Image (cartoon, coloured by chain):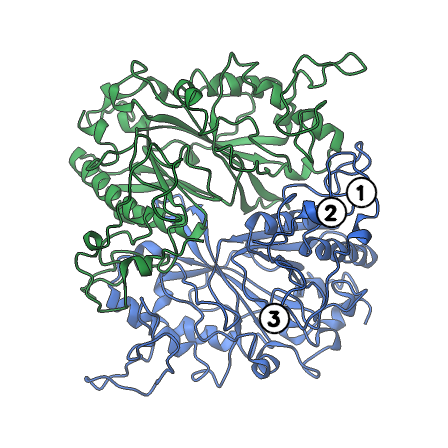
Chain colours: A green, B blue
């Protein structure tokens, strides 16, 4: 854990302390990087500004609070004012400070505290806040509410309905999204809650999802975690260290669409309920054949170690492919999908129980990519059609957001879109 | 984090490794203590057996998965067999091992794995599993299903309805409960999931609750955490170090009721939804007056530091009490309640959003005590009647469980009840 706490950072001494100008005085703004892979400026602090938004190739933190919001105001200036306010607060919080100068103990006790307080004393905890916009921000029910319809990027087309989808529209989509990742869930929840609070009167929460365990690595320095099927997940994930692949598969390039999204990325979210009770009654051999890897080591079937190259052509003594034709890792592989990869950044969840004697558990799939139509859609079509794993899962929520590039000094979330 | 991982503990080398007898060979059973306050036998391992169950006075871990189950079988022998199986698995998992020998990679690949696998490679993470039984186990709809009606302890009487309660019966009560606490949510979820799985055909999940941040300390060595109102919570909590008070207020004593519960404790759970959006619009001064403490330091109003003694008789310059008559800390104080204290062990939660633009957030109140009728009921009556905080909260789930004493060698959960 970082030794830098909100309290120490602010030199905060309790109610009534003179806190005016504390934001400026403590220098919480930290150095910029290319997106979070360099060593952070302070322990536990991920730089907020840079070429790309943090929280994409940043080594995946352990905990998530994701929120989708709708804009309830119809006024572009109000939206812009909120995005500016959000940006200032987000930068402060990722540095371990309160949401606003003065913190939970403002100078006027007759006013509500400017920070809700539950993260006081907690370190920055690698908090990242990643911002995106959904298709409905550009046009909703045929109305161009904010004069942005012409700026809608092609990747924000609606996803097709996939075989077996059980999507709940109330838990899908949204005008805006904020992904909060941290090593401390209280820090992630605090950040979302304070941003939601600032949005009162301009935005309202559409849906929100907590995740307790990351299911992918985004850096070669991270061990591969396990999903709730008990398997290592994301072994072949796109990684921060593969710069060439990131340009090709992750970051939106000049010419891909409107200029405001260049250097950004698309985020696809899918809440995947896992029927873990049924999975748990499946034999080990069947589980491994469905995935295409061993459960323990995570090695491709027929190989010995997790990162051994996969020989999709190899056959066993029976003449059948070692990795079955419908194995998950084959269907989702770059080899089967014309070279396509995505950067997965999902989380395990348990949302209580389902009222029918089972845990409501699964994987909240989050993936970043350059083009959802060319990358996610063919992959999900192949999986929905042939993946035996589909018998054990159910997609219950779906959304696509466009996440702009990183922020330069003085920038705010969405500036490239609102002030092109 | 502990260096002892499931993998290392078991010397587990991947699929096909000879794992027979691993449980016996690795000596995962650790030494007993009086309930978890002594130094653990291995880093990150809280001893499972002892005079009292672990997870009560054990220093509160950071994460929670709580599950209430109903017994679907009507057969006492099946119930006993499950409790024996659960105990073996629980002891293994708290020591950092898989739920059953053979783990996720059993010797027979045609059988389902005996452990679901998602905690492979993770350390024990201070996991504790605490077991309790509800009133409905003794009698349900007038039926004494397991021949236990005469053994029902007096503290398992139904709680009265309190002013403002919005209790959902489907999310309340339960024949059995298991409280899993850990410093790693994946470890807590893994434990509950594997126990639920073993119960298939004998029990089913009634309701379940995750908590991400502890809201109380149970040891003088822990800092006081903050709840989602942003205040330090549980400053005056009953602490593990106060042995005399534990006997008086926490542990069921001889003569309190049937002998099987001696040395145990009652657990009261209340899911308390907090209307954080409304709270966040309340002035700092009002928040502090409602609680009776300063928000920053957590000092009693009129005092300087968190642990300063509270002078409930002190008046301010205006002649009014410094701590208002209806302040939360006064109403809930031992001074107002004839000396009564309880051991709080609750957690913050966010369960997504409420469909009306707000986060579904709050505090999952868990408290252990010697007698719910004499301790929780008067306290909650006073709070429900006079606490201004009630305007900002809503109790949506309620349960009481009786948690037996700790296990000696060879004991299993519930033995004192089933084999008196």
Tag 3's secondary structure? loop
Cα gap from disc 3 to disc 1, whole angstroms: 33 Å
Mark 3 vs mark 2, foreground winner is 2
**Badge 1: chain ID:** B
Q: Is residue B406 above or below residue B11?
A: below
Which residue is tagged 3?
Answer: B37
Is A153 positioned to the left or the right of B341 in the image?
left
Q: Are marks 1 and 2 in contact (CB under 8 Å)?
A: yes
Is A3 positioned to the left or the right of A359 in the image?
left
Q: Is residue B103 above or below residue B328?
A: above
- Let me know if marks 3 and 2 both belong to one chain: yes
Q: Which circle's residue, 3 or 1, is located before the other in the chain? A: 1
**Badge 2: chain ID:** B
Image coords of residue B173 (percent x, y):
60, 60
Q: Which circle's residue, 3 or 2, is located before the other in the chain? A: 2
Tag 1's secondary structure? loop
Query: What residue is drawn where x is 69% and y is 33%?
Result: A295
Image coords of residue A385 (percent x, y):
59, 17
Which residue is tagged 2?
Answer: B10
Q: Which of A191 and B22 is in front in this view?
A: B22
Which residue is tagged 1?
Answer: B19
Image coords of residue B348 (percent x, y):
46, 57
- Work out whether residue A372 can be spotted: no
Image coords of residue A338 (percent x, y):
51, 11
């Amino acid at each position: 854990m970082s030794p830098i706490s909100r309290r120490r950072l602010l030199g905060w001494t309790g109610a009534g302390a003179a806190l005016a100008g504390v934001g400026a005085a403590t220098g919480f703004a930290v150095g910029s990087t290319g997106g979070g892979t360099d060593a952070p400026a302070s322990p536990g602090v991920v730089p907020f500004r840079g070429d790309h938004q943090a929280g994409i190739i940043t080594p995946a933190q352990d905990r998530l609070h994701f929120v989708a919001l709708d804009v309830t105001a119809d006024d572009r200036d109000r939206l812009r004012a909120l995005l500016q306010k959000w940006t200032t607060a987000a930068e402060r919080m990722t540095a371990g400070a309160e949401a606003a100068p003065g913190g939970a103990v403002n100078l006027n006790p007759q006013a509500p505290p400017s920070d809700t307080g539950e993260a006081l004393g907690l370190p920055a905890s690698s908090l990242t806040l990643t911002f995106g916009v959904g298709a409905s921000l550009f046009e909703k029910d045929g109305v161009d509410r904010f004069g942005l319809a012409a700026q809608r990027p092609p990747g924000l087309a609606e996803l097709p309905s996939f075989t077996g989808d059980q999507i709940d529209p109330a838990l899908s989509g949204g005008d805006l999204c904020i992904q909060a990742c941290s090593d401390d869930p209280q820090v992630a929840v605090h950040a979302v809650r304070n941003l939601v609070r600032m949005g009162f009167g301009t935005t309202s929460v559409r849906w929100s999802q907590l995740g307790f365990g990351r299911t992918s690595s985004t850096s070669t320095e991270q061990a591969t975690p396990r999903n709730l099927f008990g398997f290592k997940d994301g072994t072949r994930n796109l990684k921060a260290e593969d710069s060439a692949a990131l340009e090709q598969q992750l970051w939106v390039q000049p010419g891909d669409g409107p200029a405001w999204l260049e250097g950004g990325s698309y985020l696809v979210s899918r809440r995947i309920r896992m029927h873990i009770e049924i999975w748990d009654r499946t034999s080990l051999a069947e589980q491994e054949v469905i995935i295409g890897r061993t459960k323990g080591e995570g090695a491709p079937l027929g190989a010995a170690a997790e990162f051994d190259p996969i020989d999709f052509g190899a056959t066993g003594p029976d003449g059948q492919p070692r990795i079955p034709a419908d194995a998950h890792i084959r269907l989702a592989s770059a080899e089967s999908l014309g070279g396509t990869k995505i950067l997965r950044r999902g989380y395990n969840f348990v949302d209580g129980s389902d009222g029918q004697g089972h845990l409501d558990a699964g994987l909240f799939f989050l993936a970043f990519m350059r083009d959802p139509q060319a990358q996610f859609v063919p992959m999900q079509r192949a999986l929905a059609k042939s993946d035996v794993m589909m018998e054990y899962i159910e997609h219950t929520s779906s959304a696509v957001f466009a996440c702009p590039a990183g922020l330069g000094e003085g920038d705010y979330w969405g500036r490239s879109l609102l002030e092109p």
